[in-house]
Image: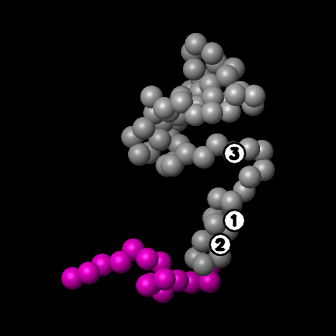
Amino acid sequence: MSSSTDPDHFFQTNQSLAEIERKSLKSKNKSGNPIRLPSKILAVIADPQCPYEAVYVAESAGNVRRVVVDVDRRQRHHL
């Protein structure tokens, strides 16, 4: 038996369609130079070595990343 996760294959209310549209627009927001992460953030702590420049982010996918938040050096460092 085949199964599908495509939302177009299922009945959706107007409210759920509006929620999908809202999330789509939100994901395209570029205001403030957002940092993109592949999964949900579970916890954030400041880097003990340089607390004003970087944080460690725990994600729901099981990853921990060191993210540089200094505006001039915006780049991601993976552990």
- Cα separation, mark 3 vs mark 1, equals 14 Å
- Cα separation, mark 3 vs mark 2, equals 19 Å
Residue most extreme to the left: 1
Q: At which x and y percent is residue 58?
A: 48, 36
- For image coordinates 26% across by 81% down, the residue present is 2
Residue denoted by label 2: 21
Identify whether 30 is placed above or below 8. above
Of the residues under marks 3 and 2, which one precedes in the sequence?
2
Secondary element under disc 1, as helix, strand or loop, is helix
Q: At which x and y percent is residue 62?
A: 39, 40
Secondary element under disc 2, as helix, strand or loop, is helix
Residue 55 appears anywhere in the view: yes
Q: Amino acid at mark 3?
A: Pro
Foreground tag (3 vs 2): 3
In the rendered structure, are the residues bearing label 1 and label 2 in contact, judged by CB atoms less than 8 Å apart? yes
Front in this rendered view, residue 42 or 63: 63
Residue denoted by label 1: 25
Looking at the picture, the colour scheme in use is one colour
Q: Which residues are magenta?
A: 1-15
Of the residues under marks 3 and 1, which one precedes in the sequence?
1
- For image coordinates 35% across by 78% down, the residue present is 4
Q: Amino acid at mark 2?
A: Glu
Identify whether 45 is placed above or below 41. above
- For image coordinates 41% across by 45% down, the residue present is 61
Q: Residues within 10 Å of mark 2 (few under 14, many from 20)?
A: few
Q: Amino acid at mark 1?
A: Leu
| Mark seen at residue 34 | 3
Specify the quadrant of the image occupied by residue 76: top right
In the rendered structure, are the residues bearing label 3 and label 2 in contact, judged by CB atoms less than 8 Å apart? no
Specify the quadrant of the image occupied by residue 1: bottom left
Identify whether 16 is placed above or below 57. below
Residue 44 appears anywhere in the view: no
